[in-house]
């Protein structure tokens, strides 16, 4: 088992990574003074697929399991208050309640949010079960729910007490969900780690097949990158976390204009956004043609799209609702693989050109 320590001024914590790391949770709970009553937040799908694992987590501790709606719809104010009502029911003077989130990024975001606001904060643990959860959502303490007006519009910064990344959860993950994680993995390599990029290129078949040594090493590198960025800019005040948005500015606009989850997943949108950002970087003379082409090729190797049928007009409208085009738009670009540059004034014309690059003809 690997232990990665995320160091913060206050509330540093460990991220445990390996096979069957959740088996270590009972002893962790016993030795920490995190609490004596556990609320597990999960959903039916994850619970049915991993009942044995989840039961092991809670074998020695009084607990209650709450199954929330699957997917993005659990990140709602209705679920926040349903969970708070359950917390109130079990909470009393003798009990010190804490939360364990067992699921994808949606469950981590919801559970973390509730933990941050109930009694002004109770402890929680993240147990991510999707690749995206393992490399991104469970690390860094950003929590959020959605309102119908916007995604992640209500949220907090609230760090977990620890994160248990158990690779065995990924065995049951459908390939479409795995790819969402691969898009973020490629993002980390492109923004920060040339060696990881080379590794992903050279070993793509073994990584995609989730061969233990390979996927474990990839996840570890991504966690370390995210942890380092969070350590330097915990609350997104210093602009350092901005580079994590590589591929996301245009990605979000594509996602919004095509309707969340319907035609395009977040990972697919980010993949296309990365193609656009690489093209813009090359057009501005920041990175070479070869680097841009390597990025496109890697995206394809991981079965993510580099082209799409869509209406550029609608994407531009979404983009202008999201960001203001005053003089130009702020985008994370590349000098080369492993080195980013935030550009404040990318012209609308260049953005339009980049959208033409990803547009499928016919
Ligand atoms: N807090 C952050 O820093 C951060 C960062 C990135 C993304 N996010 C959030 O994460 C969410 C996306 O996370 P996600 O992609 O994990 O989505 P998700 O939580 O909806 O999970 C995707 C699907 O996989 C299923 N699933 C989960 N684990 C499984 C397993 N082991 N086997 C089979 N199926 C499994 C889920 O039930 C769901 O249907 C978004 O809401 C996004 O806003 C947060
Ligand atoms: Zn993302």
Image: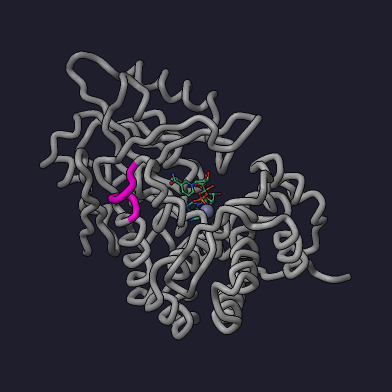
Q: Is residue 155 left or right of residue 34?
A: right
Q: Residue furthest front?
A: 327
* Range of magenta residues: 229-234
Answer with the quarter of the image where residue 191 lies: bottom left
Answer with the quarter of the image where residue 236 lies: top left
- Check the picture and name the quadrant holding the C terminus: bottom right
Towards the viewer: 191 or 168 = 191
Q: Is residue 298 left or right of residue 212?
A: right
- Check the picture and name the quadrant holding the N terminus: bottom left
Q: Main secondary structure of the magenta part?
A: helix
Residue drawn at point x = 45 percent, y = 41 percent: 107
Q: Position of residue 55 (x, y in %)?
A: 31, 45
Residue drawn at point x = 62 percent, y = 34 percent: 150
Q: Position of residue 301 (x, y in %)?
A: 57, 78
Towards the viewer: 95 or 163 = 163
Q: Is residue 341 above or below residue 209?
A: above
Q: Residue furthest left?
A: 31
Q: Is residue 293 above or below residue 286?
A: below
């Amino acid at each position: 088992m690997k232990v990665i320590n995320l160091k913060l001024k206050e509330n540093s914590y460990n991220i445990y990574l390996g096979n069957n790391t959740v088996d270590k949770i009972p002893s962790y709970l016993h030795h920490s003074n995190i609490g004596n009553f556990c609320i597990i937040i999960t959903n039916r799908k994850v619970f049915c697929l991993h009942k044995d694992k989840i039961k092991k987590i809670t074998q020695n501790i009084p607990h209650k399991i709450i199954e929330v709606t699957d997917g993005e719809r659990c990140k709602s104010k209705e679920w926040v208050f349903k969970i708070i009502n359950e917390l109130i029911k079990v909470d009393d003077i003798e009990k010190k309640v804490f939360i364990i989130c067992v699921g994808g990024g949606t469950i981590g975001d919801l559970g973390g949010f509730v933990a941050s606001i109930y009694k002004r904060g109770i402890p929680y643990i993240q147990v991510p079960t999707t690749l995206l959860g393992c490399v991104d959502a469970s690390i860094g303490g950003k929590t959020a729910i959605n309102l119908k007006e916007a995604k992640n519009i209500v949220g907090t910064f609230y760090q977990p007490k620890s994160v248990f990344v158990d690779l065995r959860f990924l065995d049951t993950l459908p390939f479409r969900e795995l790819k969402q994680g691969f898009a973020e993995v490629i993002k980390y390599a492109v923004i920060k780690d040339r060696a990881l990029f080379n590794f992903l290129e050279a070993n793509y078949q073994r990584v995609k097949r989730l061969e233990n040594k390979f996927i474990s090493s990839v996840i570890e590198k991504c966690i370390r990158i995210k942890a380092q960025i969070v350590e330097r800019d915990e609350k997104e005040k210093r602009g350092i976390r901005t580079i994590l948005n590589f591929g996301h500015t245009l990605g979000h606009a594509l996602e919004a204009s095509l309707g969340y989850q319907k035609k395009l997943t977040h990972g697919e949108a980010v993949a296309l956004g990365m193609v656009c950002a690489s093209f813009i970087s090359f057009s501005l003379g920041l990175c070479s043609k070869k680097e841009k082409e390597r990025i496109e090729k890697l995206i394809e190797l991981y079965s993510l799209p580099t082209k799409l049928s869509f209406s550029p007009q609608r994407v531009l409208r979404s983009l202008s609702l999201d960001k203001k085009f005053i003089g130009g738009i702020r985008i994370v670009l590349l000098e080369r693989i492993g080195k980013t540059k935030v550009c404040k004034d990318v012209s609308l014309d260049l953005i339009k050109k980049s959208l033409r690059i990803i547009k499928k003809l016919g």
